[in-house]
Amino acid sequence: MKMKRIILAASLLAATLNAGEWGILPVLDDDYKSEHGFALLVGYQQPSESGVDGALAYGVEASINCPLLKVPVNYIRQKLSVSYSDNDGIKLTSIEINPYYRMPIATDLEVGVGPSLGATIVKSGSLSDTVFGYGAGADIEYDINNIYVAFEARYQLTSDVDFGSGIGGNIDNFRGMAKVGYKFK
């Protein structure tokens, strides 16, 4: 059921892109502007496993206008984030890459949607495992000159944690993050 939702969201996004000029490697174009940015993140992460409490999550994010693919309408912003949370002694360090399709909705205000791929390092006491994760998210961002503030919500599905001897479980999770960052324009 979760995979169907992700496929539906991706299909809706694809349907919004009309025929136009696509481009490969826009980073090689004379008019490409990276507008690289850096942000601090803070928010809340809630595992989908029943009985496990949510926890404070925080991290950092680097972003850049996509250097690999140019879409005919709007643009794609590539984000790389590292976040950390400690849920009842289970420490999660996530590293994710998130290409978001960006759509301006007003002056200096835009929304973005897109998939995420990543890995999460899970530690509990002396036990440790690294799991693969994928999901989808959306954000809204307001630019004030080079400073930006944003809120992002995303859901991540992961492979099961396996600490060995039958110890482990599911760490699928929802995360909401507030962001404050700086964009080099």
Image: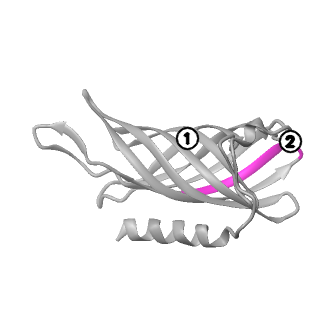
Name, please, the residue furthest toward the top. Answer: 126
Query: Is residue 115 placed above or below 5 in the rendered structure?
Result: above
Main SS of the magenta part reads: strand
Residue topped by disc 2: 31
x, y percentage for residue 69? 66, 48
Q: Which tag, 1 or 2, sits closer to the chain's start?
A: 2
10 Å neighbourhood of mark 1: few (<14), some, or many (≥20)?
Answer: some
Task: Work out whether residue 176 or residue 133 is closer to the camera in this orientation and state it.
Answer: 133
Q: Is residue 38 left or right of residue 128?
A: right
- The mark lying in front, picked from 1 and 2, is 2
Label 2 amino acid? Asp
Quadrant (top left, top right, bottom left, bottom right) of the N terminus: bottom left
Residue 92: image quadrant is top left
Residue closer to the observer: 116 or 146: 116
Image marks 1 and 2: residues in contact by CB distance under 8 Å: no
Q: Amino acid at mark 1?
A: Tyr
Q: Is residue 106 left or right of residue 159?
A: right
User: Which residue in the protein does label 1 denote?
Assistant: 58
Q: Nearer the viewer, residue 183 or 51?
A: 183
Q: Is residue 155 above or below residue 29?
A: below
Q: Is residue 82 left or right of residue 55?
A: right
Q: In the rendered view of the protein, which quadrant contains the C terminus?
A: top right
Q: Which residues are the magenta region?
A: 145-153
Does residue 150 show up magenta in the picture?
A: yes
Residue at (80% x, 39% y) in the render: 29
The stretch drawn in magenta includes residue 112: no
